[in-house]
Amino acid sequence: MQPGFSQAWPVSQRSERARRWAWIVHILFIASFFFGITSIPGVIVAYLKRGDAKGTIYESHFTYAIRTFWLGLCGAAISGLLCLVFVGYILFSLLFVWWLIRVIRPIIALTDEVPMRNPRGWF
């Protein structure tokens, strides 16, 4: 492949639908910064549409969103418990930065039309 040229992915109707749903999921995750609860419908949509996206580059986006939700929820629960000893407030700050990164990375990947690298990773 020549420099400056991206890999062309085959576009099908199924792939286009998966792309639209991936955008919706990630927009719902972004909205959670303002409304908090929108990540719940986002993860539900990700679960429902991951099977439809099987074999496309967007399957990794749904897996990434699902893992982001559950890891974030666990982190929030642990941070909430540790607020009793002040350490939780620091962890909440770190969790916010982690969540921000986990929300920005898939937007960049969607814009570049590439799959999420390492959807099973922590970061």
Image (cartoon, rainbow, N blue to C red):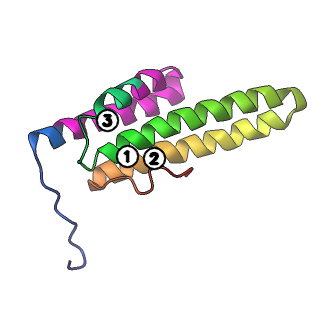
Q: Which residue is mark 2?
A: 104
Q: Amino acid at mark 1?
A: Ile
Mark 3 is surrounded, within 10 Å at the Cα level, by few (under 14), some (14 to 19) or many (20 or more) other residues, namely many
Which residues, given as a range, are shown in magenta?
Answer: 17-43
Residues under numbered marks 2 and 1 in contact, where contact means CB atoms less than 8 Å apart: yes
Residue visible at 64% across and 32% down in the picture: 74
Between the C-alphas of marks 3 and 2, the distance is 20 Å
Q: Amino acid at mark 2?
A: Ile
Between the C-alphas of marks 2 and 1, the distance is 5 Å
Residue 117 position (above or below residue 82): below
Q: Position of residue 93 (x, y in %)?
A: 70, 40
Mark 2 is surrounded, within 10 Å at the Cα level, by few (under 14), some (14 to 19) or many (20 or more) other residues, namely few
Dot 3 or dot 2, earlier in sequence: 3
Disc 1 is placed on an element classified as helix
Between the C-alphas of marks 3 and 1, the distance is 17 Å
User: Which disc, if any, is residue 50?
Assistant: 3
Dot 3 or dot 1, earlier in sequence: 3
Q: Which residue is mark 1?
A: 107
Magenta stretch: residue 102 in it?
no
Disc 3 is placed on an element classified as helix
Mark 1 is surrounded, within 10 Å at the Cα level, by few (under 14), some (14 to 19) or many (20 or more) other residues, namely some
